[in-house]
């Protein structure tokens, strides 16, 4: 029996029985329920998001590492491992879960009023309500502090105007957590998507994350009661605290895509006969496989280490940047290298390589681009901010 790439690293010994059981459940769900449809969902850019949300909710995967309000309250490591399995299927599915749990639900769980938590979290955990998280704008991605979306007081109400861009789950969401500039600071608002003045046109023609809904949010004088304000968040630290949660999931998630590519490639190279012997038997192929295995395994050790730190409550945001930068960068390199081994066969949806590679282009960009994470790490090392 041949070793698997992660088996060679012996990572199983680093995962607790409870976390492993959760991971195995998610892996089975991905293989049995999702994998047969992934290529079609990607090709047609259609996913049954609401149906999937309910299934993911019944498995306890939505907001799974949060406590209370119907959330499963697992370890952070278990959440990471679940993200890895979901992204071994498709980054779009992991994105659905990340945005729901780590961005929309976490924002309400961490910064919301008791009333907001009671109203939304149990339904969101069950997958009966979907959430999105509106921070990015057409002109402000890496620099959200410049946002133009405004929230103005009108008596007891708030009135929101502006545009958000590239918002995952936007058109299918029941609730949007929207960040807006007020006279004081940036504040967050819980916006039911059936509020008059709110619309979410879907962004079409994407070549990446096709099995994920991405939308613009249009806020045209959206009037909300005073209770729509997230009381616990004032300033950019509010949305950044949520991004750190989602980035943590990506540290593991991206490795799922890479693992799927590498395992697919190992199987293919073992079968494919070139010049009368298996492609896997050539030194050049083995050098590629060995180098990719090294990066996958190192990334996994880093992810598990960050998971332990998060479970102990000591994980810092610059450490999440180390993981996000490294693991997404290596995952996309692995996906592309695997594609060279499959050569022509690697360019279709018959195999997952280009689907993963294309998806990882978005993963490289959202939740802080690679350059932004380099700057975060640079600042941690030097004490100098080079953002401006
Ligand atoms: C599929 C998808 C889903 C998304 N989902 C969401 C979502 O749910 N919610 C949400 O709010 N946003 C979402 N985003 C938006 C994402 O977070 C932004 O795209 C990202 O922050 C980058 O912003 P930008 O695309 O405007 O790039 P820009 O900010 O315009 O960056 C352009 C380039 O400049 C570089 N750069 C930026 N600052 C510096 C600097 N100081 N020095 C040197 N180079 C720099 C960047 O790294 C990048 O290479 C999503 C994006 C995608 C693609």
Image (cartoon, rainbow, N blue to C red):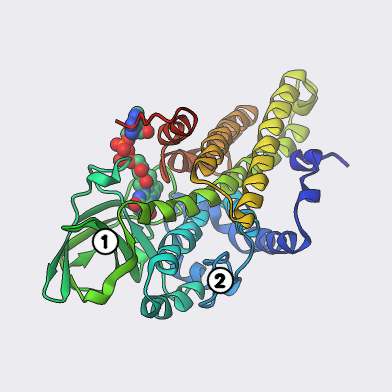
* SS at badge 1: loop
Residue 112: give x, y in percent of width and height: 38, 70
Residue 239: image quadrant is: bottom left
Furthest residue in direction left, as rendered: 154
Left or right: residue 43 versus residue 74 is left
Label for residue 216?
none
Answer left or right for 74 relative to 269.
left
Q: Residue at x 30, y 49 (%)?
A: 136
State which image quarter holds ligand 1.
top left
Question: Which residue corresponds to the image point at 56% horizontal and 30% vertical from the top-left?
Answer: 333
Rounded to the nearest angstrom, the CA distance separating label 1 from label 2 is 30 Å
- Hey, which quadrant is residue 38 in on the image? bottom right
User: What residue sits right under mark 2 in the picture?
Assistant: 67
Residue at the spot x=16%, y=74% of the render? 157
Foreground of the two, 256 or 318? 318
Question: Looking at the image, is 281 positioned above or below residue 25?
Answer: above
Q: Which of marks 1 and 2 is in front?
A: 2
The residue carrying mark 2 has its beta carbon less than 8 Å from ligand 1 = no
Up-down relation of residue 227 to residue 321 (above or below): below
In the image, 242: left or right of 8? Answer: left
Q: Earlier in the sequence, mark 1 or mark 2?
A: 2
Query: What residue is shown with label 1?
Result: 200
**Residue 155 at x, y percent in the picture:** 11, 75
Q: Quick one: label 1, few (<14), some, or many (20+) residues within 10 Å? A: many
Q: Position of residue 146 (x, y in %)?
A: 23, 44
């Amino acid at each position: 029996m041949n070793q698997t790439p992660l088996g060679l690293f012996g990572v199983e010994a680093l995962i607790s029985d409870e976390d492993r059981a959760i991971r195995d459940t998610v892996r089975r769900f991905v293989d049995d329920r999702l994998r047969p449809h992934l290529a079609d969902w990607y090709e047609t850019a259609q996913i049954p998001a609401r149906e999937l949300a309910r299934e993911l909710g019944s498995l306890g995967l939505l907001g799974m590492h949060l406590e209370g309000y119907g959330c499963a309250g697992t370890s952070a490591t278990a959440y990471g491992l679940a993200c890895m399995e979901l992204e071994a299927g498709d980054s779009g599915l992991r994105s659905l879960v990340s945005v729901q749990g780590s961005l929309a639900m976490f924002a309400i769980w961490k910064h919301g009023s008791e009333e907001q938590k009671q109203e939304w979290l149990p339904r969101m955990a069950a997958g009966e309500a979907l959430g999105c998280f509106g921070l990015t704008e057409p002109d402000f991605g890496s620099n959200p502090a410049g946002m133009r979306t405004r929230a103005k007081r009108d008596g007891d109400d708030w009135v929101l105007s502006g545009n958000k861009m590239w918002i995952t789950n936007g058109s299918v969401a029941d609730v949007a957590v929207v960040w807006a500039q007020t006279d004081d600071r940036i504040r967050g608002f819980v916006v039911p998507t059936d509020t008059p003045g709110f619309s979410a046109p879907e962004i079409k023609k994407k070549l990446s994350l096709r099995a994920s809904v991405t939308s613009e949010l249009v806020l045209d004088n959206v009037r909300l009661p005073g209770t729509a304000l997230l009381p616990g968040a004032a300033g950019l630290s509010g949305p950044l605290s949520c991004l750190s949660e989602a980035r943590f999931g990506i540290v593991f998630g991206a490795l799922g895509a890479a693992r799927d590519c590498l395992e697919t490639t190992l199987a293919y190279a073992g079968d494919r006969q070139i010049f009368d012997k298996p492609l896997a038997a050539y030194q050049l192929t083995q050098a590629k496989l060995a180098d990719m295995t090294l990066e996958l395994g190192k990334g996994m050790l880093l992810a598990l280490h960050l998971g332990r730190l998060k479970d102990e409550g000591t994980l810092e945001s610059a450490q999440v940047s180390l993981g996000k930068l490294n693991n997404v960068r290596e995952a996309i390199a692995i996906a592309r290298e695997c594609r060279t081994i499959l050569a022509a066969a690697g360019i279709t949806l018959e195999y997952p390589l280009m689907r993963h590679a294309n998806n990882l282009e978005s993963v490289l960009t959202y939740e802080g681009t690679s350059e932004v994470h380099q700057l975060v790490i640079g600042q941690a090392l030097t004490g100098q901010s080079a953002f401006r």
